Amino acid sequence: MLEWYSEGDYSDGIEETMELLEFVSERLDLGRGPLFRRPFPILDVEELIVEECGLDPFLLDEIALRAEMQRRGLLRREAEDAPWNDLFFILLFSATERRMVGQKPYFLLDWPLSISSMAKRKGQGKVERFEVYMEGLEIANGYTELLDPVEQRERFIRENKERKRLGRRTFEIDEEFLSVLGQAQGPFAGVSLGVDRLLMCLIGAKDIREVLPPGSFFPT
């Protein structure tokens, strides 16, 4: 993983990510350079799902979303008890499969708050977050950092309650992190990029083992 933080919001993180994609493709010259040059498709997550699947998950709670997906034949039997976040991703994957974005990397903007507990809020139920996809792989994600310690604590508590409801492990609240967070003068953005996944896309590889160094451990 390559991870960096800088002054600015997620729009600055998007710009930096675009510059990095272009720079790496030009320097390596692996034959797919034109795919990594601007303009890159930029899509709003909510608008994409509404256009391709015909319903808006941002307006529905877990029960209503599950019922609507079942009615439209968008819910697999093994996911009938899935929580809201999982239902959202089922819709997202369905939408991206239907939308022919081409082979270029594309950016998906403004994600659900419940999926990004440390990103700055943007309107009701959304956060300033982006993800970059290409050929079915998530290459990178980033967001504007939430700098409000009060809201961050509330999110941690809410997230632990949801994890407990689902029978998953809960986490102790990091008080030291919250105390430092209140002193930060932003905005700041953070981005994480999967170097191995980017290399896969740069050379057109179908298996991650094609880009790992010799002798690397890879679970089978």
Image: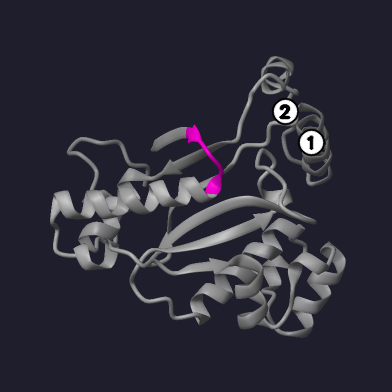
Label located before the other in sequence (2 or 1): 1
Q: Quadrant of the N terminus?
A: top left
Q: Amino acid at mark 1?
A: Asn
Q: Is residue 47 left or right of residue 96?
A: right
Q: Quadrant of residue 136?
A: bottom left
Q: Is residue 34 left or right of residue 79?
A: left
Residue 206, horizontal then vertical, whole percent:
29, 62
Q: Is residue 197 above or below residue 206?
A: above
Residue 21, horizontal then vertical, whole percent:
31, 53
Instruction: Find out whether residue 9 is within the magenta segment.
Output: yes
Q: Quadrant of residue 63?
A: bottom right
Residue 160 numbered mark, or none: 1
**214 or 141: nearer the viewer:** 141
Q: Is residue 17 left or right of residue 10?
A: left
Residue 216, horizontal then vertical, whole percent:
25, 36
Residue 6, horizontal then vertical, whole percent:
47, 33
Q: Residue at x 80, y 34 (%)?
A: 151
Look at the numbered discs 2 and 1 and tell me whether their residues touch, using CB distance below 8 Å.
Answer: yes
Instruction: Find out whether residue 11 is within the magenta segment.
Output: no
**144 or 163: nearer the viewer:** 144
Q: Secondary structure at mark 2?
A: loop
Q: Residue at x 52, y 51 (%)?
A: 11
The stretch in magenta equals 6-10
What is the distance, in whole Å, between disc 2 and disc 1 at their CAs?
7 Å
Q: Which class describes the residues within 10 Å of circle 2: few (<14), some (14-19), or many (20+)?
A: few
Q: Residue at x 30, y 36 (%)?
A: 217
Q: Which class describes the residues within 10 Å of circle 1: few (<14), some (14-19), or many (20+)?
A: some
Q: Which residue is mark 2?
A: 171
**159 or 44: nearer the viewer:** 44
Q: Is residue 35 above or below residue 12?
A: below
Q: Amino acid at mark 2?
A: Phe
